[in-house]
Image: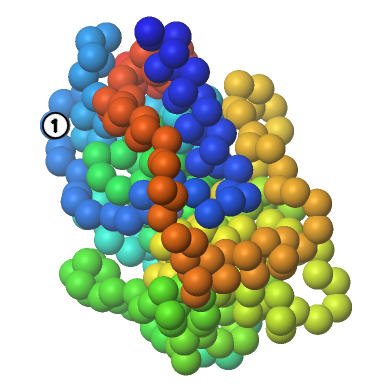
Amino acid sequence: MRARVLLSLVFTVVLASCMSNGSTMASADYDTGAPRAVPLRVSTSNEPAKALFGPVATASAQAPESFGSYARGCIAGAALLPETGPTWQAMRLSRNRNWGHPALIDFVKRLSAKAATQPGWAGLYVGDMSQPRGGPMTSGHASHQLGLDVDVWMLPPNRLDLSASERESLSSISMQRSNGAYVNSSWTRQHMEVIRAAASDPAVARIFVFAGAKAQMCKDATGDRAWLRKVRPWWGHHYHFHVRLACPAGDNTCEDQAPPPPGDGCEEAEGWVNRILNPPPPDPDPAPPTPPRGPLTLADLPAQCASVLRSQ
Ligand SMILES: [Zn+2]
């Protein structure tokens, strides 16, 4: 029985990460809640791993390394993205999720400097990255566990001197129209240029954005279109786009996702758009729903994650 549950889990993770169909397996890429400061604990029980990772306030005192997969892993020796830099501000500081692999910190700095060259963009407002030791989050995301994922707000920053409380109250804006089939009037050429810059970065494996944005970029992109391959339509992702780095070289137990299918993926994006506009009729004979699984426990994560939690 346990083997069957595990198998179906593996299948679920593969499905959820293949991004190539209209599966309703949403990536749970929404966010609420804030971290609490409680002492470090390590449990080997069935306690949800998010209850162990969520409250830890600082990174582990270890060399930087990501262990496991994007939705089932952790990170040792994470670095903190400074709350404010010359071309970025981290948002929702109370969540304490501006941590990541040093490769991710470098990437955010790089991308924000490029964003700042776009008219109307002072840089980037940076949303959730990872908890200080990665792992499952107390709320929101299924992924973001390795310190290799970052949500970038779609709201073009017009100033980078927001106070901590402004960073709690300010909201991003939606770019979608018709349930995500199209972009709305807030979408600009500059959004495409920022996403193009992200996708053109060799450290980046994938970018998730709502289908209407991918379809619009398919129409508007000129010249080399190879970067479009990394931009994948996904549910949600109209207030922010989500950038996922590939496993850094040398992180040998970090599991990359299979690369996106060859090509620019524009036909696939059209398929998403068509399904949004003309939803298929309900299946008259649906397969029985898979029973919901419990939250991940420490035993579900790579063995190294216990020492990541334990490290003072
Ligand atoms: Zn995300």
Q: Nearer the viewer, residue 236 or 128?
A: 236
Please tell me in which quadrant of the rendered image residue 196 appears. bottom right
Q: In which quadrant is the N terminus drawn?
A: top left
Task: Kindly state the secondary structure of the residue where label 1 is placed.
Answer: loop
Q: Which residue, given by chain and number where applicable, does mark 1 sit on?
A: 38
Q: Position of residue 158 (x, y in %)?
A: 42, 86
Compared with 130, 302 (above or below) is above
Q: Nearer the viewer, residue 226 or 203?
A: 226
Q: Position of residue 284 (x, y in %)?
A: 41, 48
Q: Position of residue 304 (x, y in %)?
A: 46, 15
Compared with 86, 31 (above or below) is above
Q: Residue at x 52, y 80 (%)?
A: 182
Pointer 1: residues within 10 angstroms few (<14), some, or many (20+)? few
Compared with 154, 311 (above or below) is above
Q: Residue at x 75, y 49 (%)?
A: 261
Q: Residue at x 24, y 39 (%)?
A: 138
Tell me if the residue at label 1 has its CB under 8 Å from ligand 1.
no
Q: Position of residue 236 (x, y in %)?
A: 41, 62
Q: Nearer the viewer, residue 122 or 4?
A: 4
Colour mode? rainbow
Among all residues in the image, which is located at the extreme right?
A: 223
Q: Residue at x 80, y 52 (%)?
A: 262
Residue 81 can be seen, yes or no: no
